[in-house]
Image: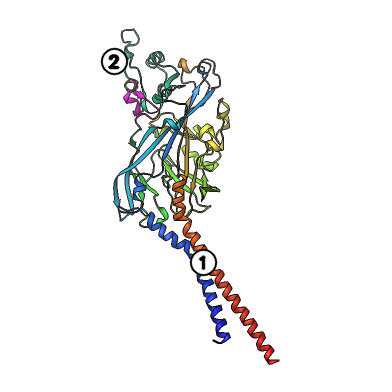
Amino acid sequence: MFPTTQMKILVGIGSVLVLLCSIFIGVFPLIFHSITSKILTLSEDGMTLEAFLSPPVPIYMQFFIFNVTNPDAIRYHGAKPVLQEVGPYTYEEKRLKYDLEWDDAEGTVTYLQNKSYIFVPEMSPGLSLEDEITTINAVMVVAADALARGGPNVVASVIWSEIERGFDLFESHTVDELLFAGFEFPEFDFDFSSVPGLEATEGLNGTIYELLEMLGLDPPGWLAENTFGLLYGRNNTNDGTYKVKTGALGIDEYLYIQEWKGHAELTYWNDTYCDMINGTDGSQYPPPIKRDTVLRLYTSEMCRSLYLTYEKDRDHFGIHVYRFIPPRDMLEDPLVNHDNLCYCKPDEDHCLGAGMLNMAPCAMGVPIVMSTPHFYQGDEVELAKLVGLEPRKEEHETFLDVEPRTGVTMNAAKKIQINIPLKPYGQFPSFKNVPEVIFPILWANESALVDEATAQEVKKGVTLPFVVVDAVCGTLIVVGALLIIVGAFKFYRFKNARKQQKS
């Protein structure tokens, strides 16, 4: 074979190897994305249906309850509430989607999702559901709020005097009663029609719910059972129908919620922005995820959509993930971030501070306030009114760790605090001397973590293909480069030899 032909073959083969492998390395992410999209797409016989119906990763709900250590000082002297955090009381959260309805034309599936909670003693060290906690009597606050809004009248005053005999502003109950089991209220007899001037009280007897109805007020529906627990009636239930994108018509809106309870937007806030239903439920996002991606999710517990932005790169058992957190702007004081003004109810004169949300519009009028735990990144004024809260990023910040190539959430923690506004309601004696404060009751951490064994399986499917492609193509590129170098060297030697022959 002629030397020049030999050189051309070496350089040609080397160039082809370098070019093809460089192109393949460049296009492989697109190939991987196409394969991933087909695998992720939901269908009645799809590979991901089982994981969609019931998450393969355990989900836990941890409750941290605030025990009030100075109830009398608060009630009689307006002292700062001194709170002692007790917890975590850990429950395993079981989810199961059912009643699926597929719409191939829309590329959607509609479903209900049942959630049940089972106490896990071994993850609640030294704690029991029989532990007694002293906390503010939320029902008494709700009743005072309802009666105060009705305006002063003799009947309301008589009713309240009897309520104060049956309730205390601060009461002790077991953790089980405060959470899921609930506790019964006494029934009342306010019929003092035999007393001159109180004829209007005739027939006023029964439960709190019945009495408020008799007074022409609009009591919250949960009072009808005459039993109260912060999560009473929510175990083994669903929160309404969801319609989500399956990915069949495109992966860009994969699992994005299209409707909740049959509506494409909420009806709580009477505003286009605040009533938007955006994003997924937070467990999965359309791939690929980039650092400038904004992750959106809808959470029915807060009656609003949230969004998270990139914070940093992290390692999750050898898997490269991006951490996303809620930006300060999302729950910023409405007077600072005007996008949040539509959450001020009943009007912009009643805005809450940073990190807080008035839930009354979606909680049947109950004056509940949701916030970040310990008012993390929240209203410094409200934080200063309490003793025992210590906001810390590591403990109290919501986050999602997402694998960027698949959009799968590898580690997540959604953290919310439940509060109730305490203030002097009307002229009711129990509230006469109390301070005005957003009073914490408990905070919850709903979390899910892909364990190390599962993470290694994910790593094989996500990272290994890229490692193999990089290794094989990298090797071939090196071989190609060497062939080009050898060919070039041979060409150089051949050229020099020809020169010497001529001379």
User: What is the three-letter code of the residue carrying label 1?
Assistant: Cys
Q: Quadrant of the C terminus?
A: bottom right
Q: Nearer the viewer, residue 109 or 75?
A: 109
Q: Is residue 338 above or below residue 503?
A: above
What's the magenta region?
Answer: 211-233
Report the Cα–Cα distance between label 2 and label 1.
87 Å
Q: Mark 2 or mark 1, which has the lower sequence index?
A: 2
Q: Which mark is residue 203?
A: 2
Secondary structure under tag 2 reads loop
Q: Does residue 376 appear left or right of residue 137 in this picture? A: right
Which residue is the site of mark 1?
Answer: 473
Secondary structure under tag 1 reads helix
Taking the image as drawn, is residue 439 in sight? no
Q: Quadrant of the N terminus?
A: bottom right
Label 2, residues with CA under 10 Å away: few <14, some 14-19, many ≥20:
some
Decide whether residue 322 is among the magenta residues. Answer: no
> Farthest front residue?
1
User: What is the three-letter code of the residue carrying label 2?
Assistant: Gly
Q: Position of residue 231 (x, y in %)?
A: 39, 30
Q: Nearer the viewer, residue 217 or 70?
A: 70
Q: Which mark is residue 391?
A: none
